[in-house]
Amino acid sequence: MPSAKAGIKQHLKIKSFWGQSENAVKTQVWIAVSVYVLVAIAKKKFMLTQSLYEILQILSNSIFERIPINQLFQQTQKRILRVKKELTLRAMWKPVL
């Protein structure tokens, strides 16, 4: 269990606390832990290759889009492959001076 605690602690991104009371701080920590666990479950269920951080970034950028999660990550994977292909083609093309 120590490795799970270390992983959760490493991935919680709490920049500042919104409240001063002990209850407010505990609530914010539990929300962060809950989000971490839900994203880890989604990563496993949908067999996502992205890191937990990348998954959180994708979700935060598309939070108001009405699209199923599995489709969202399929589209993201297609975009990543397209960008990698474009970058490879640009790297192969060298202007002649």
Image: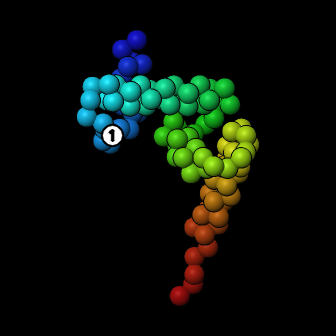
Q: Position of residue 54 (x, y in %)?
A: 52, 43
Residue shown at the point (33%, 40%) measured from the top left:
18
* Front residue (pair 26, 38): 26
Residue shown at the point (60%, 63%) measured from the top left:
87
For residue 87, above or below residue 48: below
* Front residue (pair 93, 23): 23
Q: Position of residue 33 (x, y in %)?
A: 44, 26
Label 1 is placed on what type of residue?
Answer: Trp
Residue shown at the point (48%, 40%) measured from the top left:
53
The residue to which callout 1 is attached is: 18
| Color encoding of the figure | rainbow
- Mark 1 nearby-residue class (10 Å; few <14, some 14–19, many ≥20): few
Q: Secondary structure at mark 1?
A: loop
Q: Position of residue 65 (x, y in %)?
A: 67, 50
Q: Quadrant of the N terminus?
A: top left
Q: Is residue 34 left or right of residue 83?
A: left
